[in-house]
Each structure stands twice: as C-alpha cells, then as structure tokens.
Image (cartoon, rainbow, N blue to C red):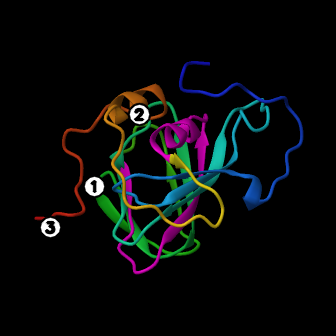
C-alpha cells in the first residue's frame, strides 16, 4: 500500500445499497460525481478490482488518458455521449459497452442534454483512489456544488494511482476537429 491507497478490508461477502457507498463530486471538466461500490478497502479480494458508477454533466467530459497497468470496462446506464478511443469516435447510449486494454488512449464526452452515467470496472483497482484524491465528498441528496478546479498536483495524483503519462496531444472536445 502506498500513500494514495486505503488499507484493505477483511475478505468476505459484501452487500450494500446506494446510500452506503462512497461518493465524490468531481472537478472540471467532468462536473459530475462518482460512487465506489466495490474496492479492496471495502471488501477484501483475492484479485483486486474496483467497481462503481460515474455521472458526467451535460457538456462535461473525462479528459483523454491511458492506463499503463489496468484494463477498464464501461457499461452505459443512461444518457447520450461519445467515447474517443485511439482517435476514433464511438456513440454512447444506454446499454453501450466499452472495453479498454492497457495503454489505450480514451476519453468520454457528454454531448447530450442530460447526465451521462455509466458503470465502470477497473482491474487491478486504483481508480477509486484517484476519484477520492481529486474529488469532494458527496452525500445522497446533496445539492450539486459549483464547478471546482482539479487539484494543482493532479498529474502527480494520476501517476500515483492508475494513469499513464500525461498526453501532450490530448483530444480537446471544446475545439472543432479539422
């Protein structure tokens, strides 16, 4: 365990409802929130992974990035948007699924009129630590806060958790494609 991870919980069966989950407001450019349903600090695991949901506000996006040591799966629950994977755009709508092997450039954009919400799974775990370190704790029923910036040390947090090196030529959904 490093200084970004929480201690592992004992192994066993775990059942919880949404009101008992860790939840964090997310900074710009996502402007939404995440919930962590399963991770090693919640229940001990032989093969560590993390599972949760992420909601991205209309006009928000998850910036382009990679994972050097992790595989990721996304299952869209609600909303409309698009995934940009290795420079190619794919529409996202309910029941869309995306699998991302290690070292694949990807981002998610909510260009719909309502929130874009998906289930995420990452193996091995670590994404939950990133969300906790950059976000603000959220309680069920709480009002959406004003947009807030990412921490100044976000690149350091990324490298200590599950992200690959910063991409100098990130895709920017706010600019027109050539």
Measured Cα–Cα span from mark 2 to mark 3: 27 Å
| 28 w.r.t. 117: above or below | above
Measured Cα–Cα span from mark 3 to mark 1: 14 Å
Looking at the image, tell me whether mark 3 or mark 1 is earlier in sequence order.
1
Can you give x and y, in whole percent of width and height, for residue 45 in the image?
77, 32
Question: In the image, is 10 to the left or to the right of 99?
Answer: right
Can you give x and y, in whole percent of width and height, for residue 107 in the image?
37, 54
Q: Residue at x 49, y 65 (%)?
A: 144
Q: Of the numbered discs in the image, which one, if any, rests on residue 158?
A: 2
Which label sits in the foreground, 3 or 1?
A: 3
Q: Residue at x 41, y 33 (%)?
A: 158
Looking at the image, tell me whether mark 2 or mark 1 is earlier in sequence order.
1
- The secondary element bearing badge 2 is classed as helix
Q: Residue 14, located in which quarter of the rendered image?
A: top right
Residue under numbered circle 3: 176
| 113 w.r.t. 69: above or below | below
Can you give x and y, in whole percent of width and height, for residue 67 in the image?
44, 37
Measured Cα–Cα span from mark 2 to mark 1: 21 Å
Question: In the image, is 79 to the left or to the right of 9?
Answer: left
Span colored in magenta: 106-135
Of the pair 86 and 26, the residue shown nearer to us: 26
Residue under numbered circle 1: 87
Quick check: is 73 in the magenta stretch?
no
Q: Are marks 3 and 1 in contact (CB under 8 Å)?
A: no
Which label sits in the foreground, 2 or 3?
A: 2
| 36 w.r.t. 111: above or below | above
């Amino acid at each position: 365990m490093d200084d970004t991870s929480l201690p592992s919980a004992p192994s066993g069966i775990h059942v919880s409802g949404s009101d008992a989950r860790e939840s964090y407001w997310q900074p710009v450019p996502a402007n939404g929130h995440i919930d962590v349903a399963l991770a090693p600090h919640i229940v001990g695991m032989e093969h560590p992974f993390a599972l949760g949901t992420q909601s991205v506000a209309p006009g928000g996006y998850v910036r382009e990035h990679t994972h050097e040591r992790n595989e990721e799966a996304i299952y869209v629950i609600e909303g409309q948007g698009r995934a940009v994977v290795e420079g190619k755009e794919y529409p996202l709508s309910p029941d869309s699924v995306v699998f991302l092997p290690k070292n694949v450039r990807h981002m998610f954009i909510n260009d719909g009129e309502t929130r874009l919400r998906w289930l995420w799974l990452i193996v091995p775990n670590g994404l939950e630590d990133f969300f906790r370190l950059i976000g603000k704790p959220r309680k069920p029923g709480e009002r959406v806060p004003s947009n807030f910036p990412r921490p100044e040390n976000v690149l350091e947090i990324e490298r200590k958790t599950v992200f690959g090196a910063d991409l100098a030529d990130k895709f920017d959904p706010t600019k027109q494609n050539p």
